[in-house]
Image (cartoon, grey):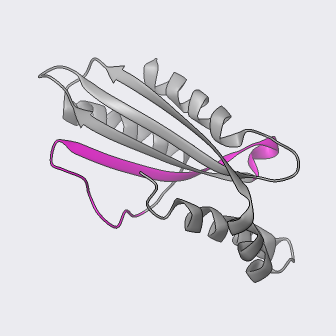
Amino acid sequence: MDEREDELLADELAALASVAGGWGGLTRFVAKLMRKNVHEIDLDVALPFEDTVERVAHVLGRAGRRVHLLSEPRTEQRMIRVVAGGGVGGMNPVVVTALVTKGGASDSQVRLRAAAKEGLIRQRAGEQTAIRLAALLDS
């Protein structure tokens, strides 16, 4: 599930730096060296596959901006990815990836992964975002 995650995070941080008057290229370079805070949560959803995909897309779509995926997994799986805001004031970009897998006729599994870069002050933005979105999907 780690497809382009580091590049997305570096690009998002560089864009924030450019808006704030900083050097985007230097920020992109430094971001690639920073450690990542990653958290994964597995959920069982009591909905058919297509309904689960629709629900996950809706919840993640409200949380952030959808990101185009380079490839799709197998036919009984769908991957949805967004870039959301996390941490203090929602200023830390978080890449959230949901992999929905078909279960039986009336259930599906969702693996939710959230990743964010960590600076000197640990905000655990990836972990907090994953927990927040899992709670929304579980309700």
Quarter of the image where one finds residue 48? top left
Q: Is residue 20 left or right of residue 84?
A: right
Q: Above or below — where is 139 with respect to 42?
A: above
Q: Is residue 35 visible?
A: yes
Q: Is residue 51 left or right of residue 125?
A: left
Residue nearer the viewer, 6 or 17: 6
Q: Which residues are magenta?
A: 68-91
Q: Is residue 84 left or right of residue 102?
A: right
Q: Above or below — where is 93 with respect to 39?
A: below
**Spot occupied by residue 101 in the image (x, y as percentages of width and height):** 25, 36
Is residue 82 shown in magenta?
yes
Q: Above or below — where is 93 with respect to 69?
A: above
The residue shown at (32%, 21%) is: 45
**Spot occupied by residue 31 in the image (x, y as percentages of width and height):** 73, 66
The residue shown at (25%, 27%) is: 108
Q: Residue furthest left?
A: 105
Q: Is residue 106 left or right of residue 125?
A: left
Residue nearer the viewer, 40 or 106: 40
**Spot occupied by residue 79 in the image (x, y as percentages of width and height):** 33, 49
Total numbered labels placed on residues in the image: 0
Quarter of the image where one finds residue 76? top left
Q: Above or below — where is 1 with respect to 139?
A: below
The residue shown at (44%, 52%) is: 81
Q: Is residue 59 visible?
A: no
